C-alpha cells in the first residue's frame, strides 16, 4: 500500500512539473485570429492579443521588425511611431540618423519589453489622422501587425464607432522575453518578425542562422512545416542582436564613378545630342498639332454657322465655346432614332434611347434652359462623368444627347434581386470610388470648380462593366456662388446646414455622397417608410451606431460571403470602415466633413485591403 501511494504521489509530481513547464512554455502562434476583432481573453491569455508573460523575465531588451512605407521612411518618423531610441535605431541598422530609406526596407527596432498584466508589451502611442481609421487599420496597416485589434480595443476607451482624427491611442507592441529553457539553450533576445508572402520556418531560420526547430518551438509549433500567414508575427530566438545584414533592403543601384574622363565626356556629348534631337522633334510635333486643331476649330465653327437659322443665338454662343467635339443633331434625326419618341424607346420620364449616326445614345428632352449644363459638360472630360455628345433645339424645346450606359441607375442596380454582382463588396467599393473620383474632379480639377448639388443613386449610372458615372448636371453651380433658390438635391440627400446658408460649397456633395455610401452598405433606400412615416436612412444608421456595437444588422444580407467550407466570412470590419467614412461625410457641421480627395484616398486603402484579403484567401 505504501509503494502504491508513493507511485501515486510521484505521478502527481510529474503532472505538476509538466503543467508548470507548460505555463512557462514557449509562446503560441496567433494564426489568423489576429485578423478579427472579436477575440476574448476572459478565460486566459490569448495569442490573438499579445505574447504571454512568463515567470523567467518580467522585463528585457527585445527587437521588432518594421517595413518602411510613407510617411515612415526616416529613422525619426519610425522612432516617433514606435517610441524607440533614434540613436539605437541608427546603430543597429548601421545607417545615419538622417538617412531616408527606400520603401519596403526592413528595419530593426530595439525596444524594452515588459510584463503588463498577463501580457508582454512595448508601449507607444499614436494620434489618429484619418476619418476612416479603425482599430483594425491602426493595428494592421499603420503598425503592420506589431499590435492587434483586440489589444488596442482592450487598452483604449474609445468606441470603435467613434474614432476620429486627433484621438490619441495607447499602442501595445508585440514583444516577448526568453523563457528559462530558451536562456539555458543560449537565447538572449526575442525578435518579433513580420511574416510576409511565401515565408516558411526553414527559410526564416536559415536567414538568422538558427535551427528551424528552435523557431518552431518558440512559437508553439509541433514541427517546422506549419503554415504561416501574412500580416502575423513570428518570434525568432536569437543568441545575439539581429544584424542589419539579415534585413532585406531595396537600395537603388549606385552609379559607379567614371574611371576615364574621356569616356565620361563622350556620354555627356551623346546625351546632349539626344536631348537636342528630342527638342526638335517635340517642336515639330506640337507645331503640327497646333495647325491641325486650328483647322478643326475653323471647320467646326463653319458647320455651326450653317445652323444659325435653327438655333437661338445665345444657345449657339454657348455651343461654339465648348469646342469642335459637340455634334448638332436635327430634330428629324432624333425622331427617326426614337421612332417618333415611341413609348417602347422610353427609358424614364423624358429620356429615350436611339441609334444616332450608327451609335446607341440617350436623348433627353428638356423644356428648361440647358446652356449651363452644356457649358459644364462641354468643358470637362472625365471617365466618371457622363459624356455629352450633342444637342438639338426644336420649337423652343431642347434635346441633349448623351452616352448610353447599359446597366442604368445605381438605385435600380442595388434593388435588382437577380444581380449577382451586387453581392460583391469589391464591386461596391469600385462604384463608390468611381463616384468619389468624379466629384473630386469637379471640386478640384475644373476651372471654374463646380458643385453638382444633386448627388443621389438615381443620378449615378453604370455602364456594362459596372463602372459608375455621374449624370444630371441641371442643378450644378460654380463653387462659392450664392444660389438663387433653396432647392438642392433630393429628399434624404439634402445637407441639413444648407438651408441656413445659400452659399454653394463642395461639402453639399460630400454630404449626399455619405448617403450614397450608406445605400451601398445597407442596400436600402435613402428614404424609408416606418409606421406610415418617412424616415431617413442616415438617421437610422447613426442612431444604430450610437446605441450598440453590433453592425451586422446594418449590412445588406447579399454581402454575406460564404467560405468554401460553409461558414460565413466575417466582413464586419470592412463594413465598419465604410460606415465610419459615410458618417464622417454626414457630419452636421460642413467644416468637419472630409474633402473628396481624402474620401478617394480612404476608399483606395479599403480597395487595396480587399484585394490583399482576396489574394490571401485564394493563396
Image (cartoon, rainbow, N blue to C red):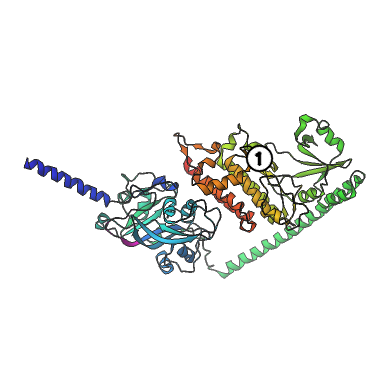
Q: Position of residue 140 (x, y in %)?
A: 47, 52
Instruction: Give the residue at the far right of this rendering.
Output: 309
In depth, the one of 517 and 305 nearer the eye is: 517
Queried whether the magenta region covers residue 578, the answer comes back as no
Q: Position of residue 294 (x, y in %)?
A: 83, 54
Determine the image quadrant of residue 497.
bottom right
Q: Along the horizontal axis of the image, is 616 left or right of 215?
A: right
- Write the start and end of the magenta stretch as one range: 51-61
**Quadrant location of the N terminus?**
top left
Position of residue 281 relative to residue 472, above or below, is: below
Asked whether residue 92 is in view, the answer is yes
Tell me the crowding category of disc 1: few under 14, some 14 to 19, or many 20 or more residues within 10 angstroms, Cα based.
many
Q: Position of residue 441 (x, y in %)?
A: 68, 53
Q: Which residue is mark 1?
A: 410
In depth, the one of 242 and 77 nearer the eye is: 77
Residue displayed at 84% across by 49% down: 319
Q: Position of residue 421 (x, y in %)?
A: 59, 36
Q: Main secondary structure of the magenta part?
A: loop
Tell me the SS state at disc 1. helix
Position of residue 619 relative to residue 446, above or below, is: above
Amino acid at each position: 500500500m505504501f509503494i502504491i501511494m508513493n507511485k501515486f504521489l510521484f505521478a502527481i509530481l510529474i503532472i505538476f512539473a509538466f503543467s508548470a513547464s507548460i505555463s512557462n512554455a514557449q509562446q503560441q502562434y496567433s494564426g489568423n485570429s489576429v485578423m478579427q476583432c472579436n477575440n476574448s481573453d476572459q478565460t486566459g491569455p490569448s495569442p490573438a492579443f499579445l505574447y504571454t508573460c512568463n515567470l523567467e523575465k518580467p522585463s528585457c531588451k527585445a527587437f521588432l521588425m518594421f517595413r518602411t512605407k510613407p510617411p515612415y521612411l526616416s529613422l525619426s518618423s519610425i522612432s516617433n511611431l514606435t517610441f524607440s531610441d533614434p540613436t539605437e535605431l541608427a546603430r543597429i541598422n548601421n545607417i545615419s540618423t538622417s538617412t531616408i530609406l527606400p520603401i519596403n526596407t526592413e528595419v530593426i527596432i530595439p525596444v524594452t519589453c515588459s510584463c503588463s498584466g498577463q501580457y508582454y508589451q512595448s508601449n507607444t502611442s499614436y494620434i489618429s489622422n484619418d476619418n476612416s481609421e479603425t482599430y483594425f487599420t491602426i493595428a494592421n496597416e499603420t503598425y503592420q501587425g506589431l499590435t492587434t485589434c483586440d489589444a488596442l480595443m482592450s487598452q483604449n476607451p474609445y468606441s470603435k464607432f467613434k474614432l476620429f482624427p486627433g484621438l490619441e491611442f495607447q499602442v501595445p507592441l508585440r514583444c516577448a522575453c526568453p523563457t528559462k529553457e530558451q536562456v539555458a539553450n543560449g537565447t538572449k533576445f526575442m525578435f518579433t518578425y513580420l511574416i510576409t508572402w511565401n515565408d516558411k520556418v526553414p527559410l526564416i531560420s536559415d536567414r538568422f542562422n538558427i535551427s528551424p526547430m528552435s523557431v518552431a518551438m518558440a512559437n508553439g509549433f509541433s514541427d517546422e512545416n506549419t503554415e504561416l500567414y501574412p500580416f502575423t508575427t513570428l518570434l525568432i530566438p536569437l543568441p545575439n542582436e539581429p544584424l542589419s545584414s539579415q534585413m532585406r533592403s531595396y537600395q537603388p543601384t549606385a552609379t559607379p564613378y567614371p574611371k576615364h574622363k574621356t569616356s565620361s565626356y563622350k556620354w555627356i556629348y551623346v546625351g546632349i545630342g539626344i536631348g537636342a534631337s528630342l527638342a526638335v522633334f517635340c517642336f515639330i510635333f506640337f507645331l503640327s498639332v497646333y495647325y491641325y486643331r486650328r483647322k478643326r476649330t475653323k471647320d467646326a465653327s463653319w458647320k455651326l454657322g450653317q445652323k444659325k437659322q435653327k438655333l437661338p443665338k445665345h444657345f449657339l454662343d454657348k455651343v461654339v465655346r465648348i469646342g469642335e467635339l459637340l455634334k448638332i443633331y436635327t430634330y428629324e434625326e432624333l425622331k427617326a432614332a426614337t421612332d417618333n419618341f415611341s413609348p417602347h424607346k422610353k427609358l424614364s420620364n423624358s429620356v429615350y434611347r436611339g441609334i444616332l449616326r450608327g451609335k446607341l445614345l440617350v436623348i433627353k428632352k428638356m423644356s428648361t434652359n440647358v446652356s449651363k449644363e452644356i457649358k459644364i459638360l462641354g468643358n470637362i472630360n472625365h471617365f466618371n462623368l457622363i459624356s455629352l455628345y450633342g444637342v438639338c433645339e426644336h420649337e423652343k424645346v431642347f434635346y441633349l444627347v448623351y452616352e448610353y450606359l447599359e446597366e442604368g441607375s445605381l438605385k435600380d442596380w442595388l434593388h435588382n434581386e437577380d444581380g449577382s454582382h451586387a453581392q460583391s463588396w469589391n464591386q461596391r467599393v469600385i462604384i463608390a470610388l468611381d463616384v468619389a473620383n468624379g466629384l473630386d474632379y469637379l471640386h478640384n480639377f475644373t476651372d471654374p470648380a463646380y458643385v453638382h448639388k444633386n448627388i443621389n443613386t438615381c443620378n449615378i449610372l453604370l455602364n456594362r462593366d459596372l463602372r459608375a458615372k455621374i449624370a444630371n448636371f441641371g442643378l450644378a453651380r460654380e463653387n462659392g456662388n450664392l444660389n438663387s433658390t433653396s432647392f438642392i438635391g433630393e429628399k434624404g440627400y439634402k445637407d441639413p446646414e444648407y438651408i441656413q446658408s445659400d452659399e454653394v460649397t463642395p461639402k453639399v456633395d460630400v454630404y449626399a455622397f455619405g448617403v450614397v455610401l450608406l445605400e451601398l452598405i445597407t442596400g436600402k433606400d435613402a428614404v424609408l417608410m416606418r409606421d406610415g412615416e418617412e424616415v431617413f436612412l442616415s438617421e437610422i444608421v447613426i442612431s444604430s451606431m450610437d446605441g450598440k456595437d453590433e453592425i451586422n444588422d446594418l449590412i445588406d444580407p447579399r454581402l454575406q460571403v460564404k467560405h468554401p467550407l460553409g461558414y460565413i466570412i466575417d466582413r464586419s470590419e470592412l463594413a465598419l470602415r465604410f460606415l465610419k467614412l459615410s458618417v464622417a461625410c454626414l457630419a452636421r457641421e460642413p467644416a468637419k466633413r472630409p474633402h473628396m480627395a481624402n474620401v478617394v484616398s480612404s476608399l483606395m486603402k479599403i480597395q487595396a485591403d480587399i484585394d490583399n484579403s482576396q489574394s490571401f484567401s485564394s493563396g
